[in-house]
Amino acid sequence: MATNAIRALHPMTKFTFALFVTAAVIAVPSYLFAYAMFAALLVIAAAAGVLREFFAFVLKTLVVLLIIVFLMQLLFYPGDDIIGGWWVFTLTQEGLAYGLLLTSRILAIGSAFILFFRITEVKDFVKALENMGLPPAGAYVVLSTLQIIPEMRRQSNVIMDAQKTRGVETEGSVLVRAKAFLPTLTPLILSAIASTEERAITLESRAFSAPVNKTSLHTLERRPIDTGLIALFTIGAVALIVWRVAVWIL
Amino acid sequence: MNKTATRKRSFQQDFSLLALLLIPIGVAINFVGFQLAQVLRLPIFLDVIGTILVGVIAGPWVGLLTGLITNSITAIFNPVYFPYVVVSMAIGVAAGLLSKAGLLRTLPKAILSGLVITAVAVVISAPITVIFFGGATGNTSSAITATFLATGQTIWQAVFSSTIITEIADKVISVLIVFFIVRSISDRYLSKMKYGEQYMKRNRRK
Amino acid sequence: MDPVIQLKNVSYRYPVGDEQVLKNVSLDIGRGKLVTIVGNNSAGKTTLCNLIRGFIPHFYKGDLEGSVLVDGEEIADAQLGQLAEKIGYVFQNPFIQISGVKETVFDEVAFGLENLGVPVDDIRRRVEDVLQLVKIDNLRNKNPFELSGGQRQRVALASIIVMDPDILVIDEPSSQLDPVGTEQVFDIIRLMKERGKTIVLVEHKMDLIAEYADELIVLADGEVKLHGPVREVFADPSYMALGIQYPHAAALALDLQEKGMELPFLPIRDEEVAECLARARRKEGRP
Ligand SMILES: Nc1ncnc2c1ncn2[C@@H]1O[C@H](COP(=O)(O)OP(=O)(O)OP(=O)(O)O)[C@@H](O)[C@H]1O
Ligand SMILES: [Mg+2]
């Protein structure tokens, strides 16, 4: 596997970076700054070789929300500095400014985490959390959830098809469609709950609750550059917040 | 170490293992419920059934974790709505406490519980909507909020009103679904859950 | 005899059950023996396995009377997590029997050793060995979720064997398997016996029992009806009344006996049938 320098960083390094972006755009009250952050994220995504995927996710999850947020501020945010009107609405400078600031922040913070998950394996992130003190049982629960969701989705499709062939209506009025909900979900839930007993026995058979410190074949590499970057991002975030609070008090 | 202490400790461990294994299932039920509501084009989300169910049979703490993990996993695909994780966790806790208080044993009480959970969801999610998203959300409730705003309400009034409207049917129906599902879980599993015993058929008969 | 597992007057009722599932069971299982448990549906076979492994009373509560000793130690006093090293447990359903968090068979087999805190280098070596032993090396990079029932059952066995327990409790390993899968599983069981493991096996394929097992326990309605060397149990006149199958060879021989033929002994393996018939003929004075 050809490892990219950015993706090869420790999960916590990448996570600290996302937190740094969050702190920075909150500390600096400028939409230009926040939009610039988004531009920086695009560059990083390109460097990490995930630009297309990153951009597709941003489009899919953020754009509609940002438009709605922006319009609501523009149309309804209270203010006196009237810059125009449209139909029954009056548009104010305050609304425009707040709309730009809020959307720029949502965009920057949202994209920082979208990028984080595009360049980090969830498995590695969970491992990093485990190294930081998350109990192994907690890590187990998260990883097992990731495997169970697609499995149960598949089962629900199977049950749904079976319901259809048995004549349960999935088309028609809302009431008719609603009636198909429980017969599909209930058997799925009951069999899932029934399986917990055997799963518990399986885990106990594999010494899951043995009172010793577990070892792990899956280890993360933490290099000096990770330590350096984490320190840098942390100091940067703290400095920005201190500066912001200082400006605010003085 | 004395014998009873050892036994007690291992019992607690085992108990918590089964409860822990319920969490992934609760999370998956949330996802499947949501997907199913979409496929059937139902006008409500039905995406907290698993959290409520786990809270009801395994208690507030396990319910809280189910909510936390549900939103954390959603965040992998769409991190923007992560702030609402607090709402999910609160719903899990509320479901656990309501169950502990015996408020899911009969249908009328379950409806009451549905209203309580609606209240919890509204009180926590409305401020998030206002502070983080300026009153907007990515779905139809934004239109309702905008309508209230247009009639001259403040942003807080408008968001609270529209949240109540979108949440009430969803949460009451979700609690009712859980009410019926719990009654069809076999005694064998209910007996092992912290708050499950009250729903066992042999106990209900008495 | 040096009993590793001892049950003394054990009775048990599940928490939500109305009746006792095991009634006054007493038995000794000797070290290094392969002991098979047979019985009709709901006879209590799985419950007996759970008891030996300590899942009763550690996991299933309910009412337990009498005592279960493993290596002279009361199982109720042991810690469930620690028992994994001493008693391996493989059960019926191969589909649920995976950790649910590992992405390759190799990691799946390593899971138990990770939980026991075994150093990483040792884990790799031991997993390699077991993959060879159980002949699943070709599956090492496969996702456990994508395996067939037979493959999963072997992965489940490997995942337990790798922890090297002295005792193996195996509950109907072949119930979901085709003949080839069954044979593979029994090969592993035979290997484990050769390595001196004590094995408690629930199985209903009588020919396999006749071939591999040392002793047979017949359970009916939660009671031990017969217990002894396999050959003696099949030959016991009261066995027939219990409504449990015989091995093919024995069933055939008993048919012949019914029709008036006198048998010198009861054959239980196919290869014994010829010998039995030959001796029966000689006895009748024919050449
Ligand atoms: N967890 C449980 N809670 C309550 N009752 C149980 C439980 N497990 C088993 N039983 C009951 O105990 C009895 C014996 O079950 P057990 O599973 O031990 O039988 P078995 O001989 O293994 O049967 P099978 O051949 O079907 O595997 C059955 O009546 C069963 O319904
Ligand atoms: Mg059984």
Image (tube, coloured by chain):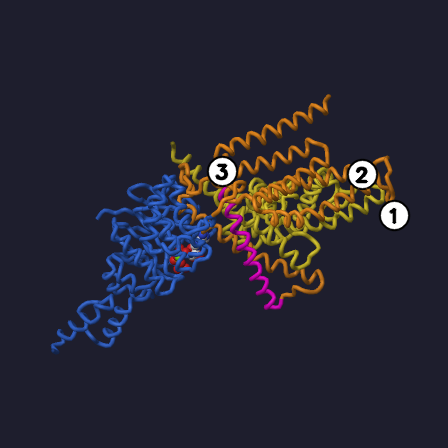
Chain colours: A orange, B yellow, C blue
- Residue C137 seen in render: yes
Disc 1 CB within 8 Å of nearest ligand 1 atom: no
How far apart marks 3 and 1 lie (CA) works out to 56 Å
Q: Which residue is mark 1?
A: A87
- Quadrant location, ligand no. 1: bottom left
Q: Nearer the viewer, residue B67 or C263?
A: B67
Q: Amino acid at mark 1?
A: Trp
The residue sitting at 33% across, 51% down in the picture is C25
**The image quarter in which residue C116 lies:** top left
Percent from the top left, x then y, of residue C239?
29, 64
Q: Residues within 10 Å of mark 2 (few under 14, many from 20)?
A: many
**The image quarter in which residue B62 lies:** top right
Question: Which region of the structure is painted magenta?
Answer: A138-167
The image's mark for residue A95 is 2
Label 3 marks a residue whose chain is: A
Q: Earlier in the sequence, mark 3 or mark 1?
A: 1
Q: Nearer the viewer, mark 3 or mark 1?
A: 1
Q: Residues within 10 Å of mark 1 (few under 14, many from 20)?
A: few
Label 2 marks a residue whose chain is: A
The image's mark for residue A130 is 3
Q: Is residue C98 above or below residue A215?
A: below
Q: Dividing the image into 4 quarters, which one contains the N terminus of chain B?
A: top left
Name the dominant secondary structure of the magenta segment. helix
Percent from the top left, x then y, of residue B45?
67, 52
Tell how many labels.
3
